[in-house]
Image (tube, grey):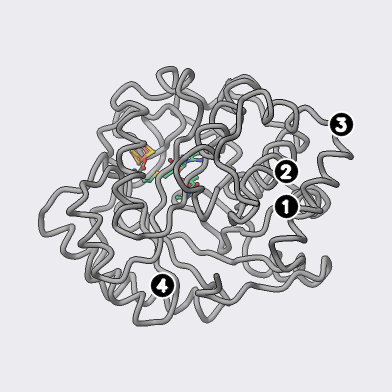
Amino acid sequence: MIKNTWTRTEIEKIYNLPMMELIFQGSTIHRQYHQTGEVQVCTLLSVKTGGCPEDCSYCPQAARYHTNVKVHKLLPVEEVLASAQEAKNEGSTRFCMGAAWREVRDNKDFDQVLEMVKGVNHIGMEVCCTLGMLTPEQATKLKDAGLYAYNHNLDTSEEFYDEVITTRNYGERLDTLENVRKAKISVCSGGIIGMGETDKDRIGMLLTLATLPEHPESVPVNALVPVEGTPLEDQEKVSIWEMVRMIATARIIMPKAMVRLSAGRVRMNTEEQALCFMAGANSIFAGDKLLTTPNPGTKSDREMFELLGLTPRESFKN
Ligand code: SAM
Ligand code: DTB
Ligand code: SF4
């Protein structure tokens, strides 16, 4: 049963289960709703990099922090489509284009992104974008161009949000998610752990996601990638058990969602990633780069899939 009336107490209880019981329950639910061993393979491309006016304290692309990210204006459509084709050839079924924008503006750049969306759709991949805030009209334009999914993360709890970002608020995040939903685009929304938040904040974020009118179809769980020059550069690495706890809880309370083991895999070994798949993760980002930071390359992921007997999920499978 899909339930969106979860209470904080209920989620807390699940989140705090003994680890072995939590993994078992995550795994059990996973088997009921998904094909075990099947993992969605997605590829990210930063189509507009750096120079962002926002102050997200985790982000290497915020203009105000001095990081090593090389600023780049919007890439040409042909270059993006060549990357998408390459990703498809490497076995990826979803292509997600990210832009370091606060929000989408109705200008030439947006028209160019719409062309990218059409092109990637034509290649036969699930096309996803993450471009910041959207109006209902912009969401409809993206949908009409063939957009399949939109990523817009809540990142953390409403209470902790102001500690991480001050240039926008939680309500604006939720408004964009509603605009995406209303345009009948698949919703991808999750967050980051390891930013100094408490368990209560992690539970709070999961509570918001799991009590939306409809659950997001994808829930990315990112471990903070600490980047030099950002305010969070010295944050300690989260333990694998915290990642597993987050993934299993998300799996149990949002059983149909694709739970994505997102940023942070470069600092996890195969055993640790296996625990995440066991707990209910069934999606990853492939390729040697996320948006601006490194990711395990195709070769090491291929070896992991072989070793663990994982199979890539086909595209457009509901
Ligand atoms: N600018 C748009 C926005 O913020 O919605 C889209 C791109 S933004 C880079 C997409 C997401 O990447 C953020 O919401 C955040 O969850 C994630 N992210 C960014 N930097 C990260 C980091 N250092 N570690 C983990 N996740 C990160
Ligand atoms: C998501 O939840 N994680 C991805 C994707 N959605 C856009 C981004 C991770 C970015 C990690 C930092 C970087 O590479 O710049
Ligand atoms: Fe800009 Fe998005 Fe990075 Fe925030 S997360 S600084 S909005 S690119």
Which secondary structure lies at badge 3?
loop
Single out the mark in the foreground, 4 or 2: 2
> Residue 30's x, y, as percent?
74, 56
Q: Earlier in the sequence, mark 1 or mark 3?
A: 3
> Residue 120's x, y, as percent?
35, 74
Q: Which residue is mark 3?
A: 18
Q: Which residue is mark 4?
A: 83
Between the C-alphas of marks 1 and 3, the distance is 16 Å
> Residue 149's x, y, as percent?
40, 60
Residue found at x 43% / y 27%: 57
Residue found at x 29% / y 31%: 54
Which mark identifies residue 236? none
Q: Marks 1 and 4: CB-CB under 8 Å?
A: no
Between the C-alphas of marks 1 and 2, the distance is 6 Å
Which image quarter: residue 299?
A: bottom right
Q: Earlier in the sequence, mark 1 or mark 4?
A: 4
Label 2: how many Cα within 10 Å (few below 14, some 14–19, many 20+): many
Single out the mark in the foreground, 1 or 4: 1
Label 4: how many Cα within 10 Å (few below 14, some 14–19, many 20+): some
